[in-house]
Image: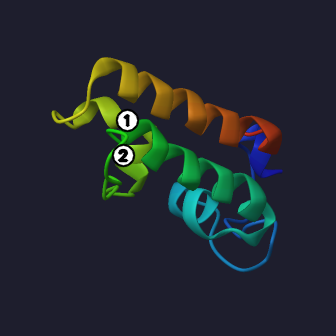
Amino acid sequence: MHRSGFTDSRQSDCGLGVEDAFHFLFKCPAHFANRSHLFSEIPEILSDGVKPYAVPMSVMFVLSPGRYDNFMHEQCEAIFNATFKYIQPSERSL
């Protein structure tokens, strides 16, 4: 029911939390494999090739990386694309 945007309950399909952006992006065990890929891809996008970049993971960062001034447009676009690649298999929409 969450996928359509209409629900009688805010309980996640996994039964372990409230279905919100934070739970979906960071906690829901149903999306662990995709999340692991996303969160390994983002540091690669931000890395300068010499040292790893400490990523400020938050809902705002993952959904709107362009709000951070210290990233290039190409990096923001790549993060946004990686995030949508994470969302797509869940059949959810923003």
Quick one: SS at disc 1?
loop
Q: Position of residue 37 (x, y in %)?
A: 67, 51
Visible residue check, residue 94:
no
Q: Position of residue 17 (x, y in %)?
A: 65, 76
Please give the name of the residue rendered at 31% of the width and 57% of the height, measured from the top-left corner: 56
Visible residue check, residue 88:
yes
Q: Alpha carbon of mark 2 to alpha carbon of mark 1: how far?
A: 5 Å
Residue 31: numbered disc: none
Residue 59, above or below 73: below
Residue 64: numbered disc: 1
34 left or right, relative to 65: right
Q: Specify the farthest residue to the front.
A: 50
Label 2 with label 1: CB-CB less than 8 Å: yes
Pick the front one: 72 or 44: 44
Amino acid under disc 1:
Ser
> Neighbour class for label 2 at 10 Å: few (<14), some, many (≥20)?
some
Q: Specify the farthest residue to the bottom.
A: 16
Q: Specify the farthest residue to the left.
A: 69
Residue 37, above or below 73: below
Q: Which residue is mark 2?
A: 61
Name the quadrant of the C terminus: top right
Q: Quadrant of residue 36?
A: bottom right
Amino acid under disc 2:
Phe
Please give the name of the residue rendered at 48% of the width and 27% of the height, measured from the top-left corner: 78
Residue 85, above or below 22: above
> Neighbour class for label 1 at 10 Å: few (<14), some, many (≥20)?
some
13 left or right, relative to 52: right
Q: Quadrant of residue 86?
A: top right
